[in-house]
Amino acid sequence: MPPQFAGNLFNLGGGTVSTTNATGSGNPGATFGIWNASSVQQISLVQRFDMVDLIARIPMMETENYRSYGLFGPRGIVMWERFKWRTVDVGAPDLNTLATFNYAGVGLAGGNTIADYNNVVSNRLYGLALGCGNEFYLGNTPVGSFSMYADVTAALYGDFVKGRAVYELEDRTIAYTYSRNMFTLAPGFDARIGFQWYIYEAITIRLGYNYLGVLNTVASPNPIDFNVGLARPAYSRNQYRSFDGLDFGIGFVW
């Protein structure tokens, strides 16, 4: 372990306090390393998802109560996730704190005794979607007309992946970084089903359910590499991602 990540010289309780000295128990450096005998460790995972597409609807067949259409267009997806491991190494108090606080309840930690480990994986997918849709007319009411729709599309993406792993002190004086760029072909599909309410001429309200699946993306299932000086976590290329939720929108036609 690099000496910059040594942490506090004393960070075990039960030491001695006098007018000239304040130390923890044990030999100096007995718990070398911020992670050894650390006081606080926090783990968090943040995931973000964004999708933009420009899909054209091409009429294929239409009757009085039914119509079918083709779907085609470009699509872009960004899947970003960050695993963070924060470790705080609290040491013995200094003499400036003894007049106000009890020794048993006081510890010192600064930017040079707090270490952050971040592993960021960013999947940027660019591709084309192709599919078809169907809409069934349900009837007319005093508040407007209603229909049911079902759309299915398949897509093929080029997945440009960035993997970034870094150990760093929180005072930003030193960092050990591992960067890796990867590329995969990622097939995907999505399905939508729901209802449309033609509330007024040229105004449509849609409510439905949407499911999206993408295969062969990249992730880091075991995100921590414990080698501080040369952190190289493993990345897996065969991860399946799925997203689902409600689809709500308002359309204006002119």
Image (cartoon, helix red, strand yellow):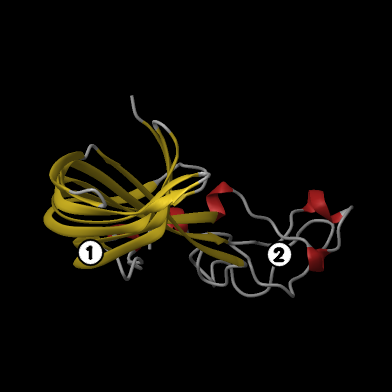
Q: Find residue 234 and report its horizontal and vertical position in percent.
A: 24, 66
Q: Quadrant of the N terminus?
A: bottom left
- Residue type at numbered disc 1: Tyr
| Residue appearing at x 72%, y 60% in the figure | 107
Can residue 196 be seen by looking at this rendering?
no
| Residue appearing at x 55%, y 63% in the figure | 42
- 171 on left or right of 65: right
Image height check: is 52 above or below 120? above
Helix, strand or loop at label 1? It is: loop
Seen as rendered, the residue at the extreme right is 99
The disc, 2 or 1, on the residue closer to the chain's N-terminal end is 2
Q: Find residue 183 and report its horizontal and vertical position in percent.
A: 12, 52
* CA distance for labels 2 and 1: 43 Å
- Residue type at numbered disc 2: Thr
What residue would you read off at disc 1?
Answer: 235
What residue would you read off at disc 2?
Answer: 23
Q: Foreground residue, 206 or 18?
A: 206
Image height check: is 249 above or below 21? above
Q: Quadrant of the C terminus?
A: top left
Seen as rendered, the residue at the extreme top is 254
Q: Foreground residue, 91 or 214?
A: 214
Q: Find residue 122 and report its horizontal and vertical position in percent.
A: 29, 50
